[in-house]
Image (cartoon, grey):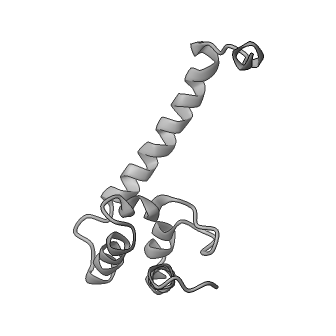
Amino acid sequence: MLTELLKPYTAIETDPLLDQAITHLEGKVENLKSLKGSSPEIATVIGKTSEAFGGLGILWLVQHNQVLQATPLDLISQGRSNEVLTLLGQIEYSVYI
């Protein structure tokens, strides 16, 4: 019955959505590449991110964060690493803000 309610989609309709997602992700990959060979301050943020979220925690840096009102990577690139580190500490120790 559920399949009767679902509208069938075609590649013509969904390919533009995939193209948008790919473009978005390519931008995030470029942002992550910019972190390679970073300063000790940025390396500390990357390390703390990995401690808090595990192996794929680095992806947290490129996701919009409602608490920070920005992506952590954007704040890092603006020299605002302390805000990101503070939030990571709160996450790590389950401190609610």
Res. 38 image quadrant: bottom left
Q: Nearer the viewer, residue 59 or 41?
A: 59
Q: Position of residue 12 (x, y in %)?
A: 61, 14
Q: Hey, which residue is sitting farthest right in the picture?
A: 5
14 to 27, vertically: above or below = above
Q: How many marks?
A: 0
Residue at the image point whose x is 22% and y is 69% from the top: 37
81 to 31, vertically: above or below = below
Q: Position of residue 53 (x, y in %)?
A: 39, 67
Q: Is residue 51 left or right of residue 15?
A: left
Q: Is residue 13 left or right of residue 33?
A: right
Q: Hey, which residue is sitting farthest left in the picture?
A: 37
Quarter holding the C terminus is: bottom right
Res. 44 image quadrant: bottom left
Q: Position of residue 39 (x, y in %)?
A: 27, 78
Q: Is residue 37 left or right of residue 34?
A: left
Residue at the image point whose x is 63% and y is 74% from the top: 67
Q: Nearer the viewer, residue 59 or 19?
A: 59
Residue at the image point whose x is 51% and y is 84% from the top: 90
Q: Position of residue 75 (x, y in %)?
A: 50, 74
Quarter holding the N terminus is: top right
